[in-house]
C-alpha cells in the first residue's frame, strides 16, 4: 500500500494503479494523480476514453504484427516501401526506434520477443513461422535481422537464419555500430541509423 497518509482511499487506489506503469515511482504516481484530479472532468474523461479505446480497438497487422488501426498497418500498405526487404525486430518499440532514424525504407516483421529459455520463451512463442511463410512465398529478397546484440538476440538471429537459410535470399544484420549487449530501443538515432545503412551479411558464430 501507499505509505503516505493520504486522506482519500480513492486517491490512494489511483496512485497504486499508476505505479504499475513502467518507470513510474510512487512520488511520480502521486503527482500524476493530483494533476488529473485538478483537470476539468471532461479532460479526464477524454484521457480515460483514449486509453480504453486503445486497449479495446487496437489491432495487430496481419502481415507484420505491428500495431495498427486497420487489419493491415500503414507500413505494409504503403506502396512506397520496399516489401522485398523485411526487417525483423523483437518488439513494436524497436520499429518505432528504427522509423525515427528515417534510414529504413523496407517493411517489418515483429517477433513479439526473443528466445530466452531462462524466461520461458521458446521459438514457438514467437512469430517465426509466419516469417518463414513470408520468405517461402517468394516475395522477399532480403531479411534484415535487427535484433538486440545480447546473447538472447544473437541466439534468436541464429535460429531464424537456420530456418530461412535454405531460401535464395540475402540475410543481413545491423553493423557493429551497435555494440554487443546493446538493445535497439536505447541506441541513439544516429548510431542506429548508420548501423542500418551499413548493414552487413549475417555470419553465424557457429560457422
Image: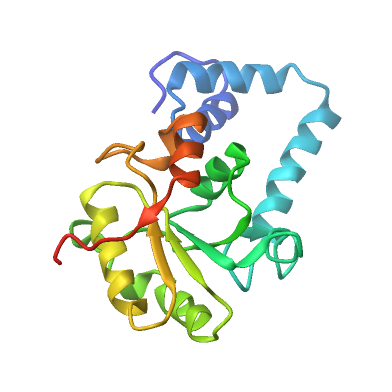
Closer to the camera, 25 or 61?
61
Residue at x 52% of width, y 32% of height: 18
Residue 16, position as x, y percentages in the image: 48, 31
- The answer to whether residue 39 is left or right of residue 31 is right
With respect to residue 2, does 52 lie above or below?
Answer: below
Foreground residue among 138 and 10: 138
Q: Residue at x 41, y 41 (%)?
A: 184
Is residue 60 visible in this depiction of the protein? no
Residue 76 visible, this orientation: yes
User: Is 198 in front, or is 97?
Assistant: 198
Query: Where is 83 relative to 167, above or below?
Result: above
Residue at 73% over, 52% down: 53
Residue 25's image quarter? Answer: top left
In the drawing, does residue 162 fall left or right of residue 1? left
Q: Residue 89 placed where, x, y %?
A: 45, 56
Q: Position of residue 102 (x, y in %)?
A: 63, 41
Q: What is the tally of numbered marks visible in this picture?
A: 0
Query: What colouring method underlies this structural image?
Result: rainbow
Residue 75: image x %, image y %?
Answer: 69, 59
Residue 179 versus residue 66 in the image, above or below? above
Query: Where does the N terminus fall, quadrant-wise?
Result: top left
User: Is 37 placed left or right of 135 in the picture?
Assistant: right
Q: State the residue in front, 126 or 23.
A: 126
Q: Residue at x 75, y 62 (%)?
A: 78
Q: Quadrant of the C terminus?
A: bottom left
- As drawn, which residue projects farthest toward the left? 206
The image quarter containing residue 125 is: bottom left
Amino acid at each position: 500500500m501507499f505509505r503516505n497518509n493520504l486522506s482519500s482511499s480513492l486517491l490512494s487506489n489511483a496512485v497504486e494503479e499508476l505505479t504499475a506503469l513502467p518507470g513510474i515511482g510512487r512520488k511520480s504516481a502521486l503527482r500524476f494523480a493530483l494533476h488529473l484530479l485538478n483537470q476539468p472532468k471532461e479532460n479526464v474523461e477524454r484521457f480515460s476514453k483514449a486509453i480504453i479505446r486503445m486497449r479495446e480497438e487496437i489491432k495487430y497487422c496481419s502481415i507484420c504484427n505491428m500495431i495498427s488501426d486497420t487489419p493491415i498497418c500503414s507500413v505494409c500498405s504503403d506502396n512506397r516501401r520496399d516489401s522485398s526487404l523485411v526487417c525483423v525486430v523483437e518488439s513494436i518499440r524497436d520499429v518505432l526506434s528504427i522509423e525515427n532514424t528515417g534510414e529504413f525504407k523496407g517493411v517489418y516483421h515483429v517477433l513479439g520477443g526473443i528466445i530466452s529459455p531462462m524466461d520461458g520463451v521458446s521459438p514457438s512463442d514467437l512469430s517465426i513461422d509466419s516469417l518463414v511463410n513470408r520468405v517461402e512465398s517468394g516475395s522477399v529478397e532480403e531479411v534484415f535481422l535487427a535484433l538486440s546484440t545480447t546473447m538472447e538476440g544473437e541466439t534468436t538471429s541464429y535460429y531464424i537464419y537456420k530456418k530461412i537459410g535454405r531460401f535464395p535470399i540475402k540475410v543481413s544484420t545491423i553493423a557493429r555500430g551497435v555494440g554487443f549487449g546493446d538493445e535497439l530501443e536505447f541506441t541513439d538515432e544516429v548510431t542506429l541509423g548508420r548501423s542500418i545503412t551499413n548493414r552487413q551479411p549475417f555470419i553465424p558464430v557457429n560457422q
